[in-house]
Amino acid sequence: MSHYNQGNVWGRVIKANNGKTRDKGTPFLELEIDCTNPEYGHILAFGRLWGKEKIAALKAYLLEHKGEIIRLKGFYDQYEENNTRYSSYTFYDFVLGNHPASRAAFILVGDLEHKELIEGEPLLHLTIMRKGADMDREQDLRIWLFDPEVYYEIVPGDLVEVRGILRKRESEDFYGGSSDSPIHPYAMTTKKRVRK
């Protein structure tokens, strides 16, 4: 199985709160990251940074460099609450220095379980097996296709790679105002992969 999950977020950390898991008391840093971009819309990414040393280093850096764009690296995930699906990230590292425009991105390779059209918008249901330190984890992810033509090139059972971002389909209306387009995880490139 050639499954893969990578999440990358470039943005400004606007909230960083300490937390601990209920079961083992493992520390994490709960992050809210502003990834606003004129092309993609007003985007906020949420995630947790793990690792005591990484948490201490990021907190120290943020004290001295508020408002700078940093890159956080990890995994992309989703969860459901009140019948609404949300995106989240699990971070294991961060990179300082000059970074390109803000964005919340993902690269995923998984099995296409199902596909559907919702109000004309193509939606993929991907299953990804992610290896963990303690156990393997199956992820059920829903990814929207930015290019609707790709919908007809893949079928359930295919191994599919998607590279995408959290964004609005249209960030602004004709007059420069914010569009009412919802924020979704959109695949900007999609291709069928060969199983190994």
Image: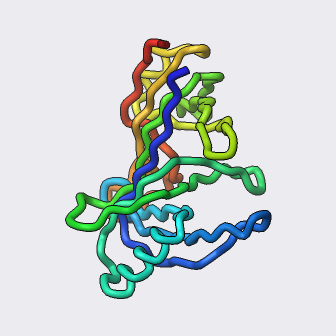
Towards the viewer: 184 or 15? 15
| Residue in the image at 23% along x and 67% along y | 97
137 sits to left or right of 160: right
Residue 79 in the image: state x and y as whole percent: 68, 50
Looking at the image, residue 79 lies above or below residue 176: above
* Residue 129, visible in the rendered structure: yes
114 sits to left or right of 152: right
Towards the viewer: 156 or 6? 6
| Residue in the image at 47% along x and 52% along y | 74
| Residue in the image at 63% along x and 30% along y | 127
Looking at the image, residue 24 lies above or below residue 193: below
Q: Quadrant of the N terminus?
A: top right
126 sits to left or right of 100: right
Residue 140 in the image: state x and y as whole percent: 66, 36
* Residue 125, visible in the rendered structure: no
Towards the viewer: 119 or 63? 63
| Residue in the image at 32% along x and 62% along y | 95
| Residue 19: quarter of image | bottom right
Residue 149 in the image: state x and y as whole percent: 42, 21
Q: How many marks?
A: 0
Towards the viewer: 67 or 185? 67
Scheme of image coloration? rainbow
| Residue 71: quarter of image | bottom left
Residue 174 in the image: state x and y as whole percent: 32, 55
Considering every residue shown, the one lying at the far bottom of the view is 63
